[in-house]
Image (tube, rainbow, N blue to C red):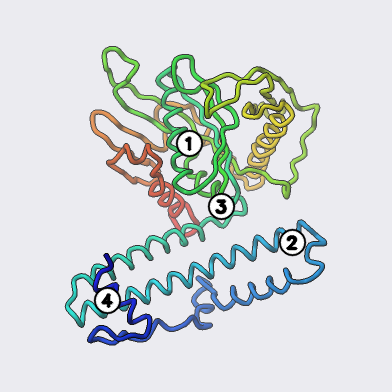
Amino acid sequence: MESAARRCYNKAASGIRLCSKKPKPSLPASRSGSTSSGGVFDFDGKKKRLEELNQLTSKPDFWNDADKAQTILKEQAGIKNVLDSWEKHRAELEEARFFLDLSKDEKSEEALTEAAAKVGKVAEELAEVELKQMLGDPDDARNAIVELHPGAGGTEAQDWAEILLRMYLRWADRKGYRHEIMEYQPGEEAGVKSVTFTVEGQYAYGYLKAEAGIHRLVRISPFDANSRRHTSFASVFVYPEVDDTIKVEINEADLRIDTYRSSGAGGQHVNKTDSAVRITHLPTNIVVACQNERSQHKNKAMAMKILRSRLYEVELEKQREKMEVYHKTKKDIAWGSQIRSYVLAPYRMVKDHRTGVEIGDADRVLDGDLDKFIQTYLLQTSDGGAA
């Protein structure tokens, strides 16, 4: 049922005075002063730019250049989302102010609770906005290609890689992202030998790049008859998906293309066909594969797309002279190189060794609740954060 404080606010917002205290005026509208605040949020500038884009999209010749039109529409949608978000937060803060004033004047604990809840919600949403501001690299907004590989340890490590796969797919579901498994090589007894999947959604790569590295699991092994504790490792590689706006030249003579019969758990993972494709780029020894389509042609096209993304990522690292960052994620999948530890025995805790973030509810993390780890890492490694 609607609370008394909420009814009071709704009546006041409708111009009907129900409470003994008349609500104070709304928060002041945005002024050009926001432009001089260090460029944190230029409301008027963004509004003016949106008007310019609206005029461009209304021109009769707008679609003469389809590529340019798509770029303009993308910018238009992005600015509109930002402005709509700002207005939404502004309205929520107005509501929070009303409840705060009501709690003071009416000595209402109910109104104070409403105010605290509203402020808390806005704070969480603004933290998300702040995080997206950190994702300023052009590739951050792209879709992501993720590869998982178990370390040494046979079934134990392969099972751990499949647990990570489930964790990331659950995380993608939480974010409302679309995901698709491109290649899946099952283990002999359990788990996976390797798996490649895509995650499609705004800032998918920007978020998931925080997960690249070695992940360590400590648990009582379900495969050990003596119930001993085992440590397993798996590596996570993340690449931005290359679209048609980025040209990556690949010499066909540098490729070795093999076809094979797809195999695996079936069901949601793979379709059993004779059309799986594996491509090896000989100069770099990069190997990619795809087996989820029934058509060999489609599998080859997707494998080439993954290969272009892999080569693009390598080239970016060369251009930025940060190859040491790239190599850091390719350390031995073993002791001393992990970015995060998932301890399930003798106690339960997940700790990120880069940021120091610890979460005691390991089950919640393995069910896809990774935002705390990702957000802290991205904020600390941004230009304004710790290196």
Label placed on residue 20: none
Q: Earlier in the sequence, mark 3 or mark 1?
A: 3
Give the x, y percent position of residue 330.
53, 32
What type is the residue that disc 1 sits on? Gly
Closer to the chain start, of discs 2 and 4, is 2
The residue nearer to you, when weighing 142 against 276, is 276
Say what secondary structure mark 3 lies in: loop
First in sequence: mark 4 or mark 1?
A: 4
Residue 202 is labelled as 3
Q: Alpha-carbon neighbours of circle 2 within 10 Å: few (<14), some, or many (≥20)?
A: some
Residue 189 spot, x, y in % from top left:
44, 15
The residue pinned by badge 2 equals 69
Q: Earlier in the sequence, mark 1 or mark 2?
A: 2
Name the residue rendered at 46%, 51% in the picture.
Answer: 378
Mark 1 neighbour density, 10 Å: few (under 14) some (14–19) many (20 or more): many
- Location of residue 299 by image quarter: top right
Three-letter residue code for mark 4: Leu
Q: Residues within 10 Å of mark 4 (few under 14, many from 20)?
A: many
Give the structural element (helix, strand or loop) at label 2.
helix
Residue lying at 68% horizontally and 71% vertically, measured from the top left: 53
Q: Name the one closer to the observer, 296 or 344.
A: 296
Distance from disc 3 to disc 2, alpha carbons, whole Å, reads: 19 Å
**Disc 3 and disc 4: Cα gap in Å?**
35 Å
Q: CA distance from mark 3 to mark 1?
A: 22 Å
Query: Is mark 4 in CB contact (under 8 Å) with mark 1?
Result: no
- How many residues crowd mark 3 within 10 Å: few (<14), some (14–19), many (20+)? some
Q: Which residue is mark 1?
A: 213
Q: Secondary structure at mark 1?
A: strand
